[in-house]
Structures are given as structure tokens and as C-alpha cells.
Image: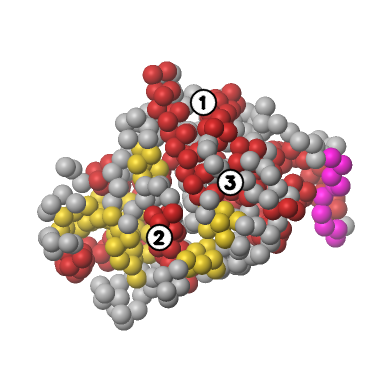
Amino acid sequence: MPPISTAWPDVDASLAVLEPEYADRITSMVAFVTPRSKVIETYASSLHPTKCPCRIITDHYTWGQSFAVFEILFDDDVSWIMRFGMRPMDAYFNTAEQLERKILNEVAALQLVRERTTIPVPRVLAFHAHPSPCNPLGPHFPAFVLMTAMAGATIEERGISTSGSGDPLRGDESKRPILLRYLRDIADIHVQLSRITFDRIGSFMLEDDGRVSVGPGADYGLGPFASAREYFRIQADAYERLAEVDVDVDVAGGGGGGGGNNNNTDPTAARLKRQFVASLWRAAIMPLLDDRDDRGPFPMRHGDLHNDNILVDVEGHIVGVLDWDCAGTVPWEAFAVPTFEVSGDFVDLGYGSRDERLAVHDAFNAALREAQDAPVPPSGRTLAELHNSNAGHVAAYLAYWMFSMACDYDHTGRALHTIMGLPDDMDLAFQKFVDAHSRGSEGIPAVVSLPSISVH
């Protein structure tokens, strides 16, 4: 059986598209790990049931925002995955404290999922959440997580595209049953996670007695929150701070462009556009919240459930769900859309064929309607209704783009403007915002209506 890592993306090609300082975070970690392979292999073999010899593959690896990822291959063809925490990107992201919260959050989340669902996830074998003299690999090693590997392919590798515009089947109608199985399995995951609830919003922590509790968010240590409104207020505050930063890079690592898509070379004008969009998001979400769900209980969300983190077999059944370090409990509105790939654009913005996106949206929504024993929050809204609502679209789908595209004007801004039903043309509304800003006034023009817009 070939190593699982043979299916990972080409290293050189992937590094070539990164900014030099980001690529250096990865290559410097590889340079640290490679000469210390024997230490890692000895430790891994000591945890194997038969103490089987192994080797860590350091010439073909992968990575995310926080971790460099390596495969450890044993002589009995068993594979494990080792993830090492990389150095901070800046003073705020991937700090040692944030990395520790993420590791502890993922370990606790995987424990919850393995105990309370049938979702296929890795098993954690060992972890050390921060560099320290008691690190079992040695005092100079970074934080790490060692877990079982999972075999499978992404839905994209099966020839089906759910992440972009255009026909997801790429003209091959024979793949439709594969797509439908995939969407039904995501719906099943969504339902199972909705049954795991807590009375606080935040990320997971492991108590000394092994119980899982909810603590501050793994990303920036905020919370936990007892109220959905307080959670969304803090989220809106974060978008407004993000809008004030003059950057032209993808702040979330998702390829969004970080404000460069505002098509304006004047940094002040571009910043005002981002601030305008951030204010739109705040004004849009607050009236859509249902007070009956404000105090929970709050469901568990994966937090990064896109196709690269989902493995399927040849028939489209999900056989592995990876990368749970962003998991946590969230308000029902934020839970409504588990991944942006199963939500159609509520407004036609010219990004490819809306019909194909809606077909995926509708197929997933149908699977939610057919789900048995799906919990219903205090408001009485079903999971299918939440997925098909303005509240879910703004709180989950557009919130994803708000961060990954840094409050961009043309996508999230126009979508929010349309959903809110503002009386002015988008560009005229922005000009009024600029005029108010120049007079030292804050805010946006009053919202005169918030119609219940169907996804169709």
C-alpha cells in the first residue's frame, strides 16, 4: 500500500504560490524536523502496539495555517499523521497561546465526536500543546499532535466540484449519485453535531477528569459567551477592526484577496469600503437573530468543513473528516450552513452559474428535511429552515466571506445590501456612508426593511 502522502499536493508547486515569509514558516519547520527524524521515529514506534519500526516522510508533506503535517509510515503499512505547530505569522495569529488552545480544542473535539457520533474521525495517539522541557520529543521541539491517518480522496479528486461556480459534475451525469451521497453524508454529519450541545458558546477544553467543557474561543481567546447576541456583537466588532487594516493579502489564507478586490488603488477609499461592508454585516445580522435561541443550548460546529477536510470513497460516502482545531459551539444561525459549498448565493453576483450552486443547495436542503430525529432549537426552526434562511446565510455563509475576503465590497457587500433591502443603490448608499464618515458620524443609512428573501 503506497503512503497516504503520495496523494498530497505537489510541495514545490504549492510553496511557489505562497508569499516568501509564509513559505519560510513551512520550510524552516521541515528543516528542523528532517535531521531529527530518528527521535520522532523512536517515539512513534514506542507507541505502536508491537513497537513496529517506522519512518517519517519529510520529502513530501503538507500544511495548513497553523501546522506542518507529516506522514509516519510503519513497516506493517500502518500510517500515522504528525502535525507540528509552526511559528507565529505575526503578533496576533498562531501565537503559542493560540496554538495551545487549538491543539487542546481539537483533542477535546475529537473525543466528543468519537464518543457521541458515528462520524469517522482520526484517533489522537499523543499530543503536547506547547514547547516545554517535558515535551516527550525533547525540550526544543514545537507543539505537536500525533493521530491515526485516514485514507480516502476529496470529492474534487473524484471529479466533482462543490467549491466553485459552474457544473459540479463537469458534464458527467453518471457522477450525480456520488454527489448526492456526499451531500446526504454531510447532512448526516450536520444532524449528528446538532445533537451535541452546551450552554455556552466557545471552544472545547479537557478537564482534569477527562470531561469536555466549553471555554474561550481557540482563535483569539474570546468568550465563552452565554448569549448569541453577545457572540455576534463581538464578531461584528472583529469585522470592523479587520476593515480598518490596510492590507492587500488574503488574511485568512483562503485566496480571497484581503480587500484588494475592492478595485480601488486609493487605500483610504478601499478602507472606507471595507468599513461600510462591516457596518452592513452588523446591521444585517442583529434583526435576524431569534431571541428564543439567544441563551442556547448551542450546537457543536466543525468550523472548517470544506472539501479538502472531507475524505470520500469511490461511491461518495464520507470516510473521514479532518482538522477539528476550529471546532466549537456556536449560535444556531452560525450553525445553519456547515460549509459554504452547500449554500447557493442568495443574490446573483455574476460569479458563474447560480443554477448549479442552487442545485447543490437544494439537494443538501432536501437531505436535511429527510433526516430523522434532527433536534430543533427552542425557536422551533428546523435545520432545513435555518439552512434556507437569511439568518443562516448572513451568519454562516457571508460571515465566511467577510473574513476570508476581508469585508470585500463587490461580493459580500452587494449580497448584504440586497438582503437588507436598502432603498438606495449600493454605490449611493456607500457614498452616504462616506459623507457621514467625513462629518464624524458613524453608521449607515437606516434600514427601512428586511424582507424574507428566499434562496430562489
Q: Amino acid at mark 2?
A: Gln
Q: Nearer the viewer, residue 300 or 324?
A: 300
Q: Nearer the viewer, residue 148 or 269?
A: 148
Which region of the structure is painted magenta? 440-449
Residue 69 drawn at (x, y percent): 32, 56
Residue 163 drawn at (x, y percent): 49, 36
Query: Circle 1 sits on which residue?
Result: 166
Disc on the earlier residue, 1 or 2? 2
Helix, strand or loop status at disc 3: loop
Q: Amino acid at mark 1?
A: Gly
Disc on the earlier residue, 1 or 3? 1
- Mark 3 vs mark 2: give the one in front: 3
Numbered circle sitting on residue 111: 2
Disc on the earlier residue, 3 or 2? 2
Coloring scheme used: secondary structure
Query: Circle 3 sits on which residue?
Result: 375
- Residue 444 included in the magenta stretch of the image: yes
Numbered circle sitting on residue 340: none
Helix, strand or loop status at disc 2: helix
- Mark 1 vs mark 2: give the one in front: 2
